[in-house]
Image (cartoon, rainbow, N blue to C red):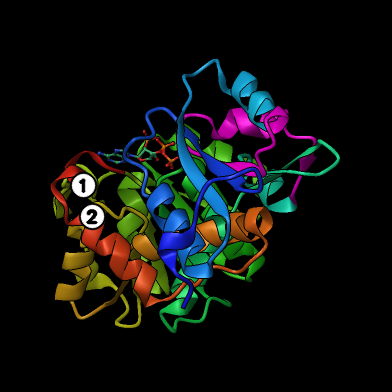
Amino acid sequence: MPDAGNIRIDGHTLLAGVIGWPVAHSRSPLMHNWWLRQGGINGAYVPLPVAPGQFETAVRGLLAAGFRGVNVTIPHKESAYRIVDRLHRSARRSGSVNTLVFDSDGKIEGYSTDGDGFVANVEAHGIAVNGGRALLLGAGGAARAIAASLLDRGMEVLVANRTRARADALAASLEGVVVVDWAQAGSVLPGCAMLVNTTSIGMEGGAQAQFPLDLAQADPALVVCDIVYVPRRTGLLEWAAGHGLRTVDGLGMLIHQAGLGFEKWFGAKPDIGPAVEALLDADLRHPRARDAG
Ligand code: ATR
């Protein structure tokens, strides 16, 4: 085991970070720096608060200053999509970028790892993602990335969103997505193998009544996923567990979406095991978790 106390910042330190506004709540620095210490890697990962409108200036500056790349979070994922030199297929499909890699030739590569991170996390729970019907609630950036990854794995994807026009726009740009009226989502639930909540209802402490469906009607094999991880046990997951349904919470997606960036910037595969999950879980129980996302 490398000695964590020996890591120091010097002229060889590999640098990366997360750009967001706000960004203080992000658990990515905790996770990446823990991985760096575990791997004995001379690297550092810092939070980078960048106001809207300053995104491109900040990225060009980080590139010039020798950073290896950055994660991008709210509200910059679409700006990131626009400034990259090379768009990975994952980013093109999801219409946003959450991971920038600065190449040695000065070019910026953009990836979206949210969708594959979601799938990898579900698979890590021993659940195969290779067919059947998924119902996605919500039509924001996360829903789009997840829909693309589920379609890639041969799943049928239905999307229901409170604002129907947003679901229609998602379906127009992702071939194969079928839109269901928010109020009608309950009618398609019985044939579904997977239900994914990508709305922020759970973050707001939302109740069962806010979901347009009744889990009592679900197939007993339904897997219920929530991408919200604060709180870890959302109202939807508690409700699903009450019906004996399998559940997958959002913390694992946070961990899995981070792996690709870490590997590209720091040249090693991070340990996506229970230890990092325990580290984050303990941190989320801390009072500052109240203002986090
Ligand atoms: P992200 O990019 O992380 O997906 P987002 O773009 O802000 O986040 O999307 C949030 C999603 O949560 C949207 O689908 C939103 O629905 P609308 O498009 O109708 O706004 C959904 N959402 C948020 N609060 C909701 C609520 N109380 N009931 C239903 N849907 C809600």
Q: Amino acid at mark 2?
A: Leu
Q: Can residue 118 be seen here?
A: yes
Whether residue 192 is visible: no
Q: Please give the label number shown on residue 132.
A: none
In this rendering, position of residue 121 left or right of residue 265: left
Q: Position of residue 144 (x, y in %)?
A: 54, 47
- Kindly identify which residue carries mark 2: 284
Instruction: Describe the element under mark 2 as helix, strand or loop.
Output: helix
Ligand 1 - quadrant of the structure image: top left
What residue do we see at 53% from left, 66% from top?
40
Q: Is residue 213 above or below residue 155?
A: above
Report the residue at 65% width, 24% height from top.
61
Provide residue 83's location: percent of width, then percent of height.
71, 28
What amino acid type is highlighted by mark number 1? Ala
Q: Earlier in the sequence, mark 2 or mark 1?
A: 2
Q: Do the numbered discs 2 and 1 sit on residues whose CB atoms are within 8 Å?
A: yes
Residue 100 in the image: state x and y as whole percent.
65, 42
State which region is magenta: 63-88
State the residue position of label 1: 289
In-front residue for pair 107/38: 38
